[in-house]
């Protein structure tokens, strides 16, 4: 198993006995994935009451909609997102 620290790409090789006494070599490329959890609570700014069922949107750096979710009964929402990017909730 080999990992290139700069690109975060790795290689894995496997060799096994094949048909008729030959050897099958397999080389696999793997990429490190990175996700983060974005979570928060939606509440009324004046009353501080939690807003159950509120619609929450996740936007990219160009204000393009990535995904939407609904806050739970406690006003809590969460998104899984890729590392290294900027978002607006």
Image (cartoon, rainbow, N blue to C red):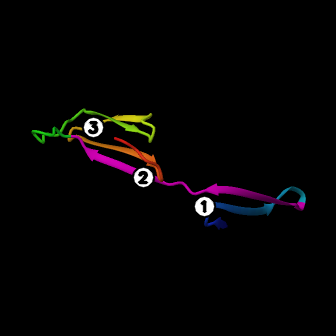
71 on left or right of 29: left
Q: Earlier in the sequence, mark 2 or mark 1?
A: 1
Residue in front for this viewpoint, 26 or 72: 72
Where residue 25 sits: x, y (%)?
Answer: 80, 60
SS state under label 3: loop
Mark 3 vs mark 2, CA separation in Å: 18 Å
* Quadrant containing the N terminus in the rendered view: bottom right
Name the mark on residue 71. 3
Vertical comparison of 55 with 75: above or below: above
Mark 1–mark 3 distance (CA, rounded to whole Å) = 35 Å
Tell me the quarter of the image containing the C terminus.
Answer: top left
Residue highlighted by disc 1: 8
* Residues packed near mark 1 inside 10 Å, few (<14), some (14 to 19) or many (20 plus): few
Total number of numbered discs in the rendering: 3
Across and down, in percent, residue 62 comes to 45, 38
Asked if the residue at tag 2 contacts the one at tag 3, i.e. Cβ–Cβ closer than 8 Å, the answer is: no
User: Residue 24's quadrant in the figure?
Assistant: bottom right
Which of disc 3 and disc 1 is earlier in sequence? 1
Label 2, residues with CA under 10 Å away: few <14, some 14-19, many ≥20:
few
Q: Write the residue at 36% across / 48% down.
A: 38
What x and y, as percent, mark residue 23?
84, 61
For residue 69, above or below residue 20: above
Q: Residue at x 20, y 41 (%)?
A: 74
| Range shown magenta | 21-42
């Amino acid at each position: 198993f080999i990992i290139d620290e700069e690109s975060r790409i790795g290689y894995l090789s496997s060799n096994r006995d094949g048909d008729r006494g030959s050897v099958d070599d397999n080389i696999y490329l793997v990429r490190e994935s990175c996700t983060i959890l974005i979570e928060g609570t939606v509440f009324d700014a004046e009353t501080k009451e939690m807003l159950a069922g509120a619609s929450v949107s996740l936007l990219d750096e160009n204000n393009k909609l990535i995904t939407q979710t609904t806050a739970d009964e406690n006003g809590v929402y969460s998104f899984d997102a890729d590392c290294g990017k900027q978002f607006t909730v």
